Amino acid sequence: MGKLKTGRHTSAIKTQRMALRRTLHNRSLKKTARESVKDLYAAAQAKDKPKTQDLFNKACSAWDKAAQKGSVHWKSAARKKSRMAKQSAKLLAAQPPAPKKSEPAPAA
């Protein structure tokens, strides 16, 4: 970094450093939230209801923390949590596709 000279743009240099730090912090919060959602969907796909409920709570908490810290807007976090609940319920309720019955070959 070197020694800062006093002048007009020293505050701009400091602001740039702070922005870089905040960007990294915000990125890590959002990544944590997205990864927790991926884990949730994997558990829901596997029809593991207790694990899904636990991961849903963790994912909601991750989005709430990101919203609380200002990484994402609170309405954006609420929307993502709502869609996440809807999707995980849909995956848990989905029945596996029934095997297709093979039709007998037409007699010629």
Image (cartoon, grey):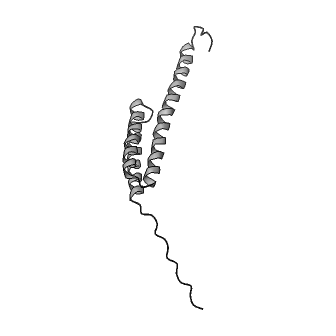
Indicate the position of residue 51 as horizontal and vertical percent values.
39, 48
Q: Position of residue 88 (x, y in %)?
A: 41, 52
- Which residue is at a point 56% across and 87% down the rendered structure image? 106
Q: Looking at the figure, which quarter contains the C terminus? A: bottom right
Q: Going by the image, does 40 lie left or right of 3? A: left
**Residue 56 drawn at (x, y percent):** 39, 45
In the visual, does 86 lie left or right of 6? left
Q: On the picture, is 105 further left or further right than 66?
A: right
Question: Is 67 in front, or is 36?
Answer: 36
Note whether 1 is above or below 69 in the view shown: above
Residue 45 found in image quarter:
bottom left
Farthest residue, direction top = 6
Residue at 53% across, 29% down: 24
Q: Position of residue 30 (x, y in %)?
A: 48, 36
Depth order, front residue of 5/28: 28
Residue at the (40%, 34%) spot, across then down: 67
**Closest to the observer: 57 or 79?**
57
- Residue at the far right in the pictured view: 2
Determine whether 41 is above or below 23 in the image.
Answer: below
Q: Residue furthest bottom?
A: 108
Residue appearing at x 45%, y 54% in the figure? 46
Q: Quadrant of residue 77?
A: top left
Front residue of 38/65: it is 38
Q: Where is the N terminus found, in terms of image quarters?
A: top right
| Callout count | 0
